[in-house]
Structures are given as C-alpha cells and as structure tokens.
Amino acid sequence: MENVLRFYKEHGPMTEITNMKDMVRDIPKDVATIVIYVQNIFIHQHWSKAYGLELSEERKREPFIRSFGEKLQFLQSVGQGTCPLVPLGPRPNEQKMISICRDFSVAAVALCREAGIPARARCGFANYFEKGKYIDHWVLEYWNEERKKWVMVDAQLDNLQQEHLKIPFDPMNVGEDFFFTGPRAWQMCREGKENPELFGIFDWWGYIYLNCNLILDANSLLKMPMQPWDMWDGYKSLPMEKWHEKDYKLMDELASLALHVDDSLEDLIHFVQQNDKIKVPEDLGKITNSLE
C-alpha cells in the first residue's frame, strides 16, 4: 500500500503545476479547506443560473480547458490569478471559472497532492441528482491517514446545491450507497444487478455511457483524468453496435482490475498501457472534442 499511496501523492499531467506555483503556495493539509478553495474558483456550468449567471457562448467554452495548470493560467489571463488561491473572502460568482464536476475533482486532487495528501479523481455515477437514476459525475477520493482508508468527497456540493438537492449525507464523506465508480457501475450492470438504462446523463444512457465512465475512471486511476467529451480511437469512440462479446469481456477485465486497484495497480497500469484502444493517447493532439 505504501507504493500505491506514494503514486497518488505525486502529480500527473492533469494536476501538475509548473508555472503557477505562487497561486498554490501554503495549501493546508486539510481536505475541507481545500474544498473551500476549489469552490471559490469554480462554478458549475449547469448550475450557473442558480447562482444568477447567464453564460455567453464564450464562457461556455471555459470547461474545455483541460488541465488544472491551464485553468490557473486562464484565471491569471482574466485577472483572477494575481494572488494565491487562498481566499481572502468569497470570490464573486461572475469571477469564478465555468467548469464541470470533473474540474472540481481534478482541482481538489491537485491541491491535495500539493499538500502531500494522496488523492485521485474518480469518474462514475451519483444517485443524488435525479431520483431513481445514476447520473454521470466525478468525486475526489483521498487517503485518510487517521482512518487508514480512502474517503470520497464531492467537492462540487456547496451549501446552495446541498439545500436544493436535499443531500442526505456529508459531502466530505460520500458513501458507496450514493456514488458508484465507473468500474463498479459496469460490473453491477453486467451481473444483472441494475438496469444499464438508468446510467447516463442528458440524451446518453446505457452501456454507451457505462463504457465511457469505465474508461475515464481507469485512465484517471493512472493519473490521466480526461473530460467526458474527449474522444480518441478505440473503445471511447467505437459504437456499441460494433462490439462483440470479446469486447465486453475485455471491459469486464478492465473493471475488475480498476475495482481492485490498490492490490493490482501495476497490473492495471500494464493492462491499460498495452491496449491502445483504452489508454489516453500520448499525443493529446489526437483527441477530439465530441461537442464541437
């Protein structure tokens, strides 16, 4: 476990901070405070109206900025990066960067790692956004040294969202009854324990989205948390009607390795890295945006 924790304490390409170190100095080793910092720089695109914002088409493109380092550069470019992320007070909503759930989680992971806390972003489905359905979502998972276990945190759920959704749990400790990682959701449906058509978001439901989040979570466990609209050659873009049973079985194996990542990290890394249809391309220029 020591090697696993060391691995998740170190940055990956999506969380590393090179040119903007001044913005993240003195990050406390306290996850609750880190969540406050994240909520002070981001506002969720699909909750914007609840905060009194009407987004222009230009602002709707802000979530396309992929890495946390690039997001810090953006904040600096619009005049919001002249001081550290440590808030002197609440940032006005109109000055926050437009983001999605994945961004809250990746930013929280980045700040946890800056503070020396092992952390990883998890892609999956939450059952607290729409009754009876499992909605596409991301959370932070960090290592709680005192409890000697991984703890899931929903860094997106501020007071407004908690009250609106009537959240029945502490967002600092999201239990497995409320969030289902991509590998777990895939396995549940493959074993007939749940209806795959209940998993998805907007117009996309079923195995097409289960496959999406399984691949995103597996790559995120390898410290490459990509965006839902990121597409590359392979299973991320291969239409499900072209799949054969061997394809499903390959994903079953991927799900099993990801579910047991703490015991099989090296096996998961090898499995993904040896399969070009699963892993994120080394050349990120080969990734396309399915929304454009």
Image (tube, rainbow, N blue to C red):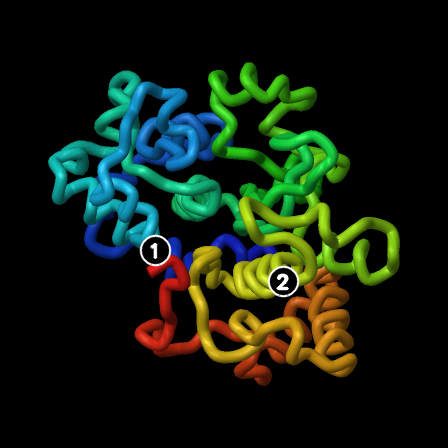
Q: Position of residue 127 (x, y in %)?
A: 68, 36
- Residue at the image point whose x is 69% and y is 20% from the top: 168
Q: Position of residue 193 (x, y in %)?
A: 87, 51
> Which of the two discs, 1 and 2, labels the residue nearer the N terminus?
1
* Count of marks overlaid on the render: 2
Residue lying farthest right? 192
Q: From what the image shows, is residue 241 above or below residue 156? A: below
Location of the C terminus (image quadrant): bottom left
Mark 2: which amino acid?
Answer: Ile
Q: Position of residue 72 (x, y in %)?
A: 25, 45
Q: Nearer the viewer, residue 81 or 49?
A: 49
Location of the N terminus (image quadrant): bottom right
Pointer 2: residues within 10 angstroms few (<14), some, or many (20+)? many
Residue annotated with mark 1: 66
Q: Position of residue 57 (x, y in %)?
A: 24, 43
Task: Determine whether the residue tagged by mark 1 lies in a helix, strand or loop.
Answer: loop
Task: Give left or right: position of 81 versus 98.
Answer: left
Residue 47 location, quadrant: top left
Q: Report whether residue 3 is seen.
A: no
Task: Give left or right: position of 274 versus 55.
Answer: right
Residue annotated with mark 2: 208
Check if mark 1's residue and mark 2's residue have beta carbons within 8 Å.
Answer: no
Pointer 1: residues within 10 angstroms few (<14), some, or many (20+)? some
